[in-house]
Image (cartoon, rainbow, N blue to C red):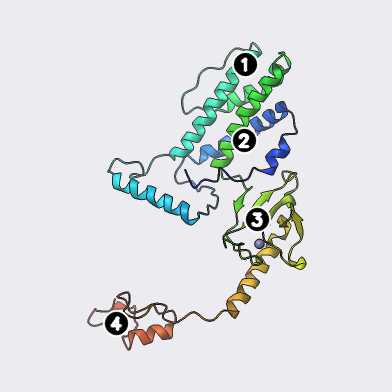
Amino acid sequence: MTHSNRQAARSVVRVAREGRSALDRALDDLREVETLVGFLALLRDPAAKRPWREVVLDAFQRAELDDEARAELADRTEDAPGEHRDAARPDVLDALSGVLWRAQDLAAYVLRAVYHPALPEAGPAADPRPYLRAAREHLPTAVTGWTNGKDFAYFAADRAAAMLDDLEAALALNVDGHTVKAVCPWCRGGLAGSYSWRVRALPGSTTDLSLVVIVCESGVCNPPTKDVTTWWKGVPAWPFRDWPWLARRLARLDARRAALAPPPPVFPAVQGSTGRAGTASTPDAEAALLDGVPLTTDRTTDPEGTAA
Ligand SMILES: [Zn+2]
């Protein structure tokens, strides 16, 4: 996948988490995975409405996707994936089985370390929660009971973090780095003129929602003091509580700019140049274009039945 946001800047929340012990991180992540996996299981049903995250593609990424789609279209047959509606979302099943095998694996290691009888092997569609619970209950004993317990804690923390990452991605819970689909009114998106606003979760945002901010990352943004409430690492930042104000300010600035701009031409296309008679953008222009043809959508009053 070339259009995914894998190379995006690292979440500052994750950096802050690294100050805590591996055992604490593993236990917290396992508890979170246990909660979230139920929600992901609900999304197996294709009729269930799915949370999503805004994806913004640049021209190059869009061209790459178009190329992939053309190649795929050329190879498409009646048996190709996607040709028929599936009974379950295959990517959700993939994510669920990824959680299940990691949970089983981790539980097996933890239980062996504390001389606890192993849990029975589960089928491919089993519930991973009993394994997660067993791993969480016995992990502190396993870590403190062995001389290499520290390594074991790091291993468990990695496994738990991998499961949580998959779940958060599948449930679109990663707000950090989310692109806001709006052009910054103060820098017009910088030199490239792209969408430069990102949602960033600053350290401490898990307990204080106002630390979730929108920042303008164009690099040249310098709004007037009255328009920016705070700055973070040299870029303007608008905390969560200011977002309604920011939306209103953006709408007002856009409206003012639209009022100052010259009105769009009535016929954007030159008549005849495209084989069509231009595009009418106002009712008057439409009437002039049709030149006396009665504008009716009611078929019953049309004796000839020729009105479209
Ligand atoms: Zn800006």
User: Callout 1: few (<14), some (14-19), or many (20+) C-alpha neighbours within 10 Å?
Assistant: many
Callout in the foreground (1, 4)? 1
Question: Which marked residue is nearer to the observer: mark 1 or mark 2?
Answer: 1
Q: CA distance from mark 2 to mark 3?
A: 34 Å
Residue type at numbered disc 2: Thr
Say which amino acid is labelled 3: Glu
- Which comes sooner in the sequence, label 1 or label 3? 1
Query: Which amino acid type is shown beneath numbered disc 4?
Result: Thr
Distance between mark 1 and mark 3 Cα atoms: 47 Å
Do callouts 2 and 4 mark residues in contact (Cβ within 8 Å)? no
What number of labels is visible?
A: 4
Q: Which residue is mark 1?
A: 111
**Residue that badge 3 annotates:** 217
Q: Earlier in the sequence, mark 1 or mark 2?
A: 2
Which residue does the image show at 38% across and 47% down from the upper left? 68
Q: Give the amino acid at mark 1.
A: Leu
Q: Can residue 103 be seen?
A: yes
Identify the mark at residue 35; answer none if there is no mark: 2
